[in-house]
Amino acid sequence: MQEKSARPSGSPRKKFGQTCCVPNVPCHGARLSVRKINGRVREELVLDLGRDVKLTLIRIEAGSFMMGSPDDELGKGVNENETMHPVTLTRDYWL
């Protein structure tokens, strides 16, 4: 696992440290780690919020995918009527 202390892509231009890189979240530090899992790069941002509270965020990359479930999905309930539809994320975000 590699660790970086630089600003992650797609995040606001604030320094890690007393002012957190996430707007309106006071934190005492942040650690960005980059790992390869199943051949894909995964970025995690761990924020130390103080009082032994840590928040782990995972970077979700921009892209397109199909959301919903097919009509013939095994076990699909009668009240589930979300049809499949395309979704495009235009920017990376942290979740």
Image: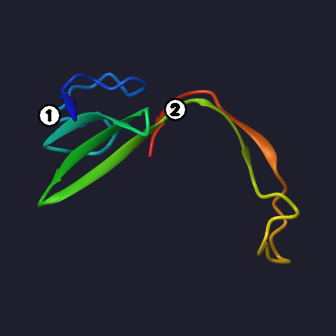
The percent coordinates of residue 57 (x first, y second) are 36, 46
Reply above or below: 76 against 3: below
> What is the x, y in percent for residue 20?
24, 37
**Could you tell whether 1 is left or right of 51 in the image?**
right
- For label 2, the crowd category at 10 Å Cα-Cα, with few meaning under 14, some 14 to 19 and many 20 or more, is some
Pinpoint residue 49: horizontal percent, then vertical percent.
19, 51
Which one is in front in this view, the residue at disc 2 or the one at disc 1? 2
Identify the image quadrant of residue 71.
bottom right
Residue at the image position 19 percent from the left and 44 percent from the top:
27
Return the residue at label 1.
17
The quarter holding residue 25 reads: top left
Instruction: Indicate whether 16 appears above or below 6.
Output: below
Q: Position of residue 18 (x, y in %)?
A: 14, 37
Lower sequence index among marks 2 and 1: 1
Q: Amino acid at mark 2?
A: Glu
> Cβ–Cβ below 8 Å for labels 2 and 1?
no
Secondary structure of the residue carrying tag 2 is loop
Tag 2 residue: 61
Identity of the residue drawn at 39% across and 23% down: 9
Quarter location, residue 40: top left
Any mark on residue 50, and which?
A: none
Residue 37 lies left or right of residue 20; in this view the side is right
Cα separation, mark 2 vs mark 1, equals 25 Å
The amino acid pointed to by label 1 is Gly
Q: Residue at x 56, y 27 (%)?
A: 91
SS class, disc 1: loop
Q: Farthest residue toward the front?
A: 38
On screen, residue 49 above or below 8:
below
